[in-house]
Amino acid sequence: MFGGGVLGPNLRRNGTTAGHKAAGLVVALLLPLGLTACRRQASAAPTALAPTVEVSQARSASTEATIVTTGLVQRRREVALAFRVPGVLTAVNFEPGDHVKSGQLVAMIDPTALAARRKQSQADLERIRRELDRDRRLNQSGFVSQQQLENQQMAFTVAAAADESTRFDEGAARLSSPVSGDVLQRSAQAGEVVQTGQLVLKVADAGSPFILRAPLSLRDAAKVRVGDPATVHSDTSVIALSGRITRVGDAADPLTGTVLVEIELEPQASLRSGEAVRAELTAHGEGASRDGVRIPAEALIEGTGDRASVFLLDRNSTARRTAVQFLGLQGEDALVRGIALRAEVITAGGGFIRDGDHVRVLRSPPPPSGAAR
């Protein structure tokens, strides 16, 4: 009992110390194994993936549709030649297809009636002049009042103007062309009585360009603009001619419901007035903008009024937030200004990324050629 009473506690203390040492040895031995296992588990954990987005290229705001129309070629300026006074037509010197020079005599009317009117006006003027001289002398003697003298002076002024008019009309018996060009139409024959302003000849001014006026439906007319190019095909030329739209009509014809478009053609010696040609025009989609591009509407983020943003994809597959100006809609696409043609725009997935994020790209297939998305 003594020994047990004295040695028992010592043994317990020694046993505890030995146990601690043994436990520390086990931990020291197991620690490398545990670290190795943790490393293996860490290496086996999946790596975080970059978000996946879809990308589409910014395209031209214009669709690729072509509008075809036909019409007759003519000179921009066609001059209708007519007499200023009535008379009997005595000569017409040109036929359709003939070439006439500026200042050349083209037709005449009988000058007899004009000459008679001229003689009558001269006689009236001379008579009133003599009466005016007489009244002046009598006015000085008091036999003619001042009022009567003034009336006579007024009559003389009127007679002088009438004489000048007949003198001018006497030269109107000869009709000359004010331009050089081809005769397009002859509407009177020698021996006929022509009235003032009645068409005798129509001449195409060779100094003016060739134009084509062709009809378009209201829908097609809304898709072309002044300044747009045009390709014109003529039977007299194996080479397609170039042109540009110079005018689009403001109103539709009440009978046909079509709008006239005017196309100015490049100079071509083989063209003739009245020739039928075919024109091909490029159609723009509704709401198209000349300096904007077309992108899928879902690419827009945080739009307010005409301001919006998109995510562009750079060469390092990084999303870059870019401000754009919203111009309108074109079908399922948006028209915007502020990014370049063929720039890569993030469409699907843009709501889950931030500026500067690295992304994985899934490109949207391009739409069919000539069609809007």
Image (spheres, helix red, strand yellow):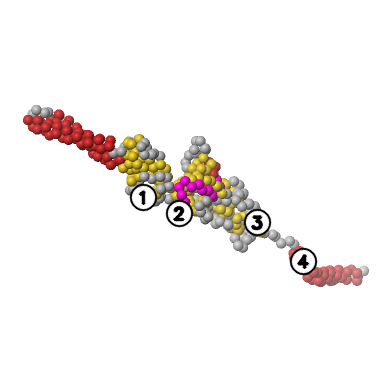
Which kind of residue does numbered mark 4 sit on?
Arg
Q: Which mark is residue 40?
A: 4
Q: Is residue 364 left or right of residue 214?
A: right
- The secondary structure type at the circle numbered 3 is strand
| Residue 251 lies in the magenta-colored region | no
Residue 352 is situated, as x and y percent measured from the top left of the image, at 64, 53
Magenta part of the chain: 270-289
In the rendering, which numbered label is found on residue 363?
3
Q: Nearer the viewer, residue 336 or 71?
A: 71
Q: Which residue is mark 1?
A: 101
Residue 334 relative to residue 10: left or right: left
**Which of the pair 302/179 is nearer the observer?**
179
Residue 333 screen position, x and y as percent: 59, 48
Task: Name the residue carrying label 2.
Answer: 269
Residue type at mark 3 is Arg
Q: Earlier in the sequence, mark 4 or mark 3?
A: 4
